[in-house]
Amino acid sequence: MRAALPDILDISHQPMNAVAPKISFVSLGCPKALVDSERIITSLRSEGYELSKSHAGADLVIVNTCGFLDSAKAESLEAIGSAMAENGKVIVTGCMGAEPEQIRDVFPNVLAITGPQAYESVVSAVHQAVPPKHDPFVDLVPDQGIKLTPRHYAYLKISEGCNNRCTFCIIPKLRGDLVSRPIGDVLREAEKLAKAGVKELLVISQDTSAYGLDIKYAPSMFKDREIRTRFFELARELGQMGMWVRLHYVYPYPHVDEVIPLMQEGVVLPYLDIPFQHASPNVLKAMKRPAHQDRTLDRIRKWRDICPDLAIRSTFIVGFPGETEEDMDILVDWLKEAKLERVGAFKYEPVKGAPANDLGLDLIPEEVKEARWHRFMKAQAEISARIVKGRVGKRIQVIIDEAGPTVAKGRSKWDAPEIDGNVYVASRRPLRAGDIVTEKIERADAYDLHGVAV
């Protein structure tokens, strides 16, 4: 994901005696990296730096890279190359910065390279290249910090790193083991976002349901109360703040069951983002993932018994080394049984440094990966079409993302921004981004809904 700078950051008011240094910023990768970018930008803005929407008009460029897949590394190198060509003064940070030689070999003249979460190092490198010209009467930063998302939704990162050791993944190598933020700090940030007008919180981490495990669920103070740093308590407390709360990157540990009643009660959205990755026991074992998908189906049924409105989103990998046609049959059959509402699939890419490279399993030819991916997505498209058609005639709540003269675009409680479906709302009255309206669904296509505001 490449984050565009919102109009709110195009600030032109300057002190009479100084021109504020301008920084151009490129943010690549996942929402977790986007939050890192927001923190860096907030720090720089508090010191008087401005943000430029072009490399050419900036004093230097910061590129926050993604290093998870080879294709992501190629995109990061391309972004660095563009910044070097258009500006020449470039600081590189993010996951790819954890292995700086990959960048130095191609671009030896970048000013500095830092790894992920190294906010202070990035700011220090900026200070060296372009010293700040701070004016405390002009350089005002909102209490909630600078956000790169639209005003009405925000990502809330609750932890860094991951304790899992999936063989296809190098995230623990890049970002380290799980480090949870105290729940009091997380809730105070959420409260600031609510006061700033945020309508939807997207809770993110590498492993959201492991939240607090590393600190033994230690209690933390929030508003004169002690609250345990734990997944259930986090969901419950966030759900009291008057915003939609959407839970991402949830591993299906047993205690996830505790949160389903909160969804039925409307405390948090009935939406779980769970990266199942596959269904074949052989493939899951090779991935070092939980390999009891029959039990998972039972749990999904129980969750839906408690909360019939529940939507489950997941991602899968096809073409993992050693995957057979029988493994693929198991995956597609499982998918048809699970009837997941939202699904994405990726064709396996070898990642340098990932344990999967050393398993000694046969690599799957690209044309076979492609065929399996199409088979998987065809099966899911049929499932999704049946689910969305079942919503026709119903009245649902929709959060508006984009206004339009007669038709606005938004999302239901079953849809996260950028990765899920859209809901189109025809309305006689003007609708603004961030409005939450009731809509009667009149028709559906494969993934999206269409209707009228009521």
Image (spheres, rainbow, N blue to C red):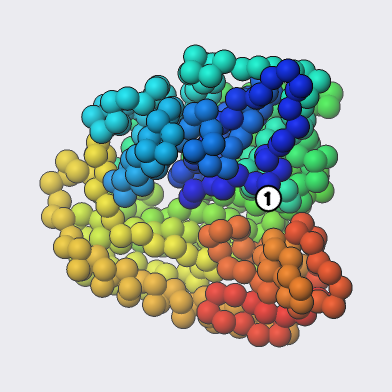
Q: Residue at x 34, y 44 (%)?
A: 78
- Judging by the rendered image, the residue that carries numbered circle 1 is 150
Name the one closer to the observer, 421 or 372: 421
Residue 259 percent across, percent down from the top left: 65, 49
- Count of numbered marks: 1
Q: Residue at horizontal 38%, vertical 56%?
A: 277
Could you tell whether 269 is left or right of 28 in the image?
right
Give above or below for 57 relative to 396. above
Residue 306, visible in the rendered structure: no
The crowding category of the residue bearing disc 1, from other C-alpha atoms within 10 Å (few below 14, some 14 to 19, many at least 20), is some
Q: Is residue 67 above or below residue 105?
A: below
The residue at 53%/42% (across/down) is 54
Question: Residue 94, position in %: x, y?
Answer: 43, 32
> Element at badge 1?
loop
Give, as a three-letter code, the residue at label 1: Pro
Res. 96 image quadrant: top left
Q: Is residue 381 shown left or right of residue 68?
A: right
| Between 328 and 347, the one nearer to me in the picture | 347
- Residue 69 on image: x %, y %: 32, 46
Looking at the rendered image, the quarter that the C terminus falls into is bottom right
